[in-house]
Image (cartoon, rainbow, N blue to C red):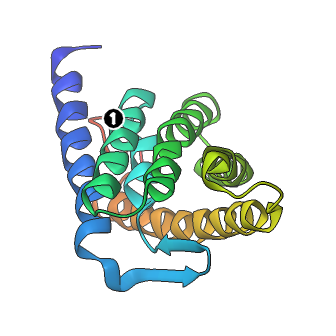
Amino acid sequence: MNSNKKVRQMVFAALLTAFAIIIPIQFGFLKIIIPPFTATIASHVPMFIAMLISPMVAVVVGIGSTLGFSLTGLPLPVVFRASTHIVVGLIGAIIVLKNRNFKMAIIITGPIHGILEALVIIPFVPVGDYKILIITCIGAIAHHYVDGTIAYALAKAIAKSRRKNIYTAFNDSKSA
């Protein structure tokens, strides 16, 4: 990878990480609460956009998302759920890299995201209360697809404005 591409990816990683931190802190009015589940609409969008750039950018943005949710002062289970963005972003970025199919990456990572969010909260769930895990899993999948739709629309708009496709909109490639 040439140095220009590395710098570009670092800048995108920094900007998307800033959004991943700011969204849960400043956009609490986008929070949906279906006890015990909570979701901040658009909080996955930086992760999805990062998937279009590179696996490393997706991991960095996932770490930033975890940091953003930890800075909100929300309970530890919410922060742990945000940490799943690291793995989900990485898997999605690998799918995009191999298949150039953003929609497929969103679809495939939805159930993975939901299952991971349910798994990371197990230490916080009272023994035998599987309802919380099921609500978290289903809620995370639904939230994933809502934010995936927002991210896809945003990526398409950025690509259109740059006269490129969504796979080249964030790099110097000339193909449209």
Relative to the observer, which residue lies in front, 159 or 147? 147
Q: Is residue 98 visible?
A: yes
Mark 1 falls on what kind of element? Answer: helix
Query: Relative to residue 52, is residue 6 depicted above or below?
Result: above
Residue 93's place in the image compared with 66, above or below, is above
Nearer to me, 54 or 67: 67
Q: Please name the residue shown 77% across and 54% down the image.
A: 127
Tell how many labels.
Answer: 1
Q: Give left or right: position of 151 versus 70.
A: right
Q: Position of residue 119 (x, y in %)?
A: 68, 45
Say which quadrant the N terminus sits in.
Answer: top left
131 relative position to 74: left or right:
right
Quadrant in which residue 7 is drawn: top left
Vertical relation: 125 (above or below) 33: above
Which residue corresponds to the image point at 32% horizontal and 53% vertical from the top-left?
70
Residue on which disc 1 sits? 60
